[in-house]
Image (cartoon, helix red, strand yellow):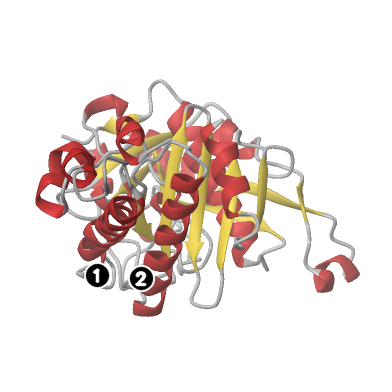
Amino acid sequence: MNAIAHSAHFLFRPQEILPELSPSPKSMSSTVSGTYNYSEYENTSRAFFAKKIAVTPLEAIKTRQENWDGHNSAAPLIHSVIKAEETLNKLFEASLKASLAWSQPFISSDEDGVVTLEWWNHKKKVTIYAQSTASEFIKVWGANIDDEMEDGELTDQNLLQVWRWLMA
Amino acid sequence: MANSLTRICYKCGAGSWLEAKLYQSSILEWEFTYRSISPGSIKDGIGHAAKISSTAFNDTNKQPSVNRSLITESPKKVMQNPDCCVAKIKVSAVRDIKSIEVTDEALKKLGHSTYGIDVISRPIGKGESVPENIAHCQIEVSPTVITGSRFGKIKESLAYIVNESKNRWALPPT
């Protein structure tokens, strides 16, 4: 699936922003002897979207102060913000490569200042805790902690698996 | 607020006789509690359709504070900040989060196999660092030593309960 076909799934719709970013595939075709060469186009757009998706909502969270929620929660840790950005980039890249839908996370932070990324899909939910060392995930499909939740460390190996579960 | 373990005695003048009796009693299954929720923990959306994040139950002591609706004058009294919203949580739903397996080896050696969860009345008396509040309760876990990931799941469970409830807002986001 090419980048244009993918665009229906994105919150940031490529057709709305891409003309400013890079030449359209049609104009690119004239430079590659009548054959569409999407590699440069895709790489640029991927980088653009990944950056856009990661940075825009995270910028807002950087301005949070201690006790932002009235429950004495710590201000977001800078290491955690960096980790969250890295995790978002990886997840976005992985979902794009696997032709899976993408949706924007809800970004917040916990009592210790760890940045949280949350997604809902009907009754299913995934929360990622961007710990400074390693990110952790919780999959939720009910209120029962032992039978309807699963947690673990988010690795490059299981990243896509977690995303597939949410989007299925 | 979560630090306070002080119980008010009605003999020293805090609250009415009925209020005193209420906070001395255990909290009933059918009661509701209020939780102040910051806009930073509410997924975009206004009105009754808005969803809450698990961060709505952040608590540094891993004992999220709530207020008994029965003896709270108005949900507005619960708001931590003027832009906060107030969610309603049924006590029985919180108590239904039970049999949470203990994974901590030290606790297992002490004979604990599961955590229990309950809404406990923890009134705040006069002269403390936070305003007096006889309706103050805490969602507490026993045994009290709980790891970050276990508490994370409890917060997820609480958020799930609220989000699945049709009548989840006492003061919805506007």
Q: Are marks 2 and 1 in contact (CB under 8 Å)?
A: yes
Q: Position of B93 compared to A110: left or right?
A: right
Q: What mark, if any, has residue A28 been given in the picture? A: none
Q: Is residue B7 above or below residue B46?
A: below
Mark 1 burial class by Cα count in 10 Å: few <14, some 14-19, many 20+: some
Q: Is residue A137 visible?
A: yes
Residue placed most toward the observer, A132 or A147: A132
The residue positioned farthest toward the left in the image shown: A20
The residue positioned farthest toward the front in the image shown: A33
Amino acid type, label 2: Val
Q: Which residue position is annotated with label 2?
A: A81
Q: What mark, if any, has residue A62 been given in the picture? A: 1
Residue placed most toward the observer, B97 or B75: B97
Which residue appears at 37% of the width and 63% of the height?
B125
Amino acid type, label 1: Lys
Which residue appears at 65% of the width and 53% of the height?
A151
Which residue appears at 24% of the width and 70% of the height?
A62
Residue A144, position as x, y percentages in the image: 67, 38
Q: Quadrant of residue A34?
A: top left
